[in-house]
Structures are given as C-alpha cells and as structure tokens.
Image (cartoon, helix red, strand yellow):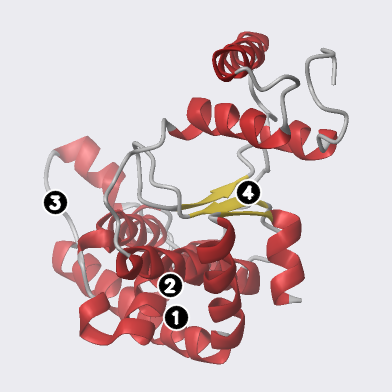
C-alpha cells in the first residue's frame, strides 16, 4: 500500500479490483475515512477489514443497524447465494467482486459485480440476467417454503421485468417481435403499438425463465446451500472464497 499506516498483510490485488473505476478523489476519501476510523478506535495500523468497509460504504452505502433475527439472516443468505450461484452457472465470465448479507442503505444483501467489465448485451445475456434476478426468490422459497415468499424480491422482479422487456419490446430479439422496436414507434407517434403482443411475449419470457431458474436451483442446490452457510458464518465472501465453495 502507498501509506505506511496499513498492515502489510492487506491483499493489494483484492483492493485494486474493488476500487476499479473509482476516481482519485474517491480513493483519497476512502483513505481519509479509514485513517479517521483507526484513530477514533486507536487500533494502530489499519487492517484489511477496516479498509474494505470504507470502500463498501462509498460504493453501496453505510451499514444499517437492523434487529435481524436468525431466520431473516438465513433467508437473506439463501437469497443472495441463489443469485450468485446461478449467475456463475449461466454467466461464468462475469466477475463477482463479493457477496454480502450485511444490510446497507440500498439492500439487505447483495451480489456485487465488477462495474468495469464490458458486457455483450445478447439475447442469451438478457435471458440469463432474467434467471439470475429470479434465482434469489427461487432459492429462498425452496429452503423456506411459503414463509420465504416475501417482499425482499421486489427489486429483483423489477430487474427481471427490465431484462424481459428490453429484448422483446426494444431490441427485437424475440422470434415473434423480430427487428421490432416498439419504443421508437411510440416516440414518433405517441401511440402504443403491439401492446397486447408485447405483454404476451414478456409473460412467456418470464414463464420460461422461471421454469429454467427453478430447474437450475434444484440442480445446483448443494452449491447454493454451501454458499448460504458460508455467508451466515462470514457475512461477506470474496470472489476467491465463493469460487472455492462451488468448484
């Protein structure tokens, strides 16, 4: 590390990957806040966990203090494990920076991807992305039954709808809407075209993705369970830890 206030055992490669895309001002802020935390707690040299927390605060918001019972933590763990494992199955090339069940301002848990990685937005990507969005709820319901069917998947459903709508209505990727961009027609005329057809195709896309997701969750349940248990023990898993659990 550039500053001698940090412990030598810090994984520099991990820090570099997690701060990719940050500006110089962002990095300086992380350093400043980390030093202030260390001074306030009189901890001596700064360890990796303190540095990682300041990076996460900048990227994802501060921790939320919640009175989470063991069942809620377990639900979050299986939910995030479902997202992560199915993501790695369908899109092995996507870099997962970390998986966390630490509640923050934006979510109760998260699977964080490398924001700098380029993505090829193919039809296969959109379908895989739909499945990944649905995998959290699928894993949670498989583990907890109807008691796991809660509102925690609201943002996931929004992501799934977005991943279905784009290829069907905007990019003309569905065989029955091939080369049609209904959004342009609406921009030009103000009228809504192909509405009933678009709704039907989106519903079919989501139904197919739901079926595929449920099958994959069943198939990779052992890996999902391993990741969930590790999250309950560690709270946060790096990409290396995650890979060691599923390979």
Q: Position of residue 204 (x, y in %)?
A: 30, 79
Q: Nearer the viewer, mark 2 or mark 4?
A: 2
Label disc, if present, on residue 192 of the rendered structure: 3
Q: Residue at x 50, y 65 (%)?
A: 232
Mark 3 element type: loop
- Provide the secondary structure element on which disc 2 rests: helix
Give the spatial CA distance, label 4 vs label 3.
Answer: 30 Å
Residue situated in front as seen by the camera: 221 or 192 = 221
Local secondary structure at mark 4: loop
- Per the image, label 1 sits on a secondary structure element best described as helix
Left or right of 77 on screen, residue 141: left
- Measured in 3D between alpha carbons, the distance from the residue under mark 4 to the one under mark 1, in whole angstroms, is 21 Å
Of mark 2 and mark 3, the one earlier in the sequence is: 2
User: As displayed, is residue 12 above or below residue 233?
Assistant: above
Label drawn at residue 135 = 2
Q: Position of residue 70 (x, y in %)?
A: 35, 67
The Cα–Cα distance between marks 2 and 1, rounded to whole angstroms, is 6 Å
State which tag comes first along the sequence, 4 or 1: 4
- In the rendered structure, which disc, 2 or 1, sits on the residue that comes first in sequence? 2
Give the CA distance from mark 2 to mark 3. Answer: 32 Å
Q: Residues within 10 Å of mark 1 (few under 14, many from 20)?
A: many
Q: Which residue is mark 1?
A: 213
């Amino acid at each position: 590390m550039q500053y001698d206030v940090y412990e030598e055992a810090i994984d520099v490669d991990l820090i570099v990957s997690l701060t990719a895309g940050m500006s110089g001002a962002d990095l300086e802020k992380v350093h400043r806040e980390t030093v202030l935390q260390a001074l306030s707690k009189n901890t001596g040299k700064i360890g990796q966990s303190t540095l990682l927390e300041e990076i996460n605060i900048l990227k994802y918001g501060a921790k939320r203090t919640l009175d989470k019972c063991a069942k809620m933590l377990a639900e979050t763990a299986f939910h995030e494990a479902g997202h992560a494992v199915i993501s790695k199955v369908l899109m092995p090339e996507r870099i997962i920076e970390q998986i966390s069940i630490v509640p923050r301002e934006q979510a109760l848990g998260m699977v964080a991807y490398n924001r700098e990685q380029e993505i090829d937005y193919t039809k296969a990507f959109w379908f895989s992305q739909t499945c990944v969005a649905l995998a959290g709820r699928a894993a949670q319901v498989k583990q907890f039954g109807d008691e796991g069917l809660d509102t925690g998947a609201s943002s996931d459903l929004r992501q799934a709808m977005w991943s279905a709508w784009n290829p069907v209505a905007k990019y003309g990727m569905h065989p029955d809407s091939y080369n049609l961009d209904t959004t342009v027609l609406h921009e030009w005329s103000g009228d809504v075209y192909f509405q009933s057809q678009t709704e039907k195709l989106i519903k079919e896309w989501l139904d197919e993705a739901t079926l595929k997701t449920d099958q994959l969750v069943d198939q990779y349940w052992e890996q999902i369970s391993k990741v969930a248990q590790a999250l309950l023990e560690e709270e946060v898993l790096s990409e290396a830890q995650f890979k060691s659990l599923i390979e």
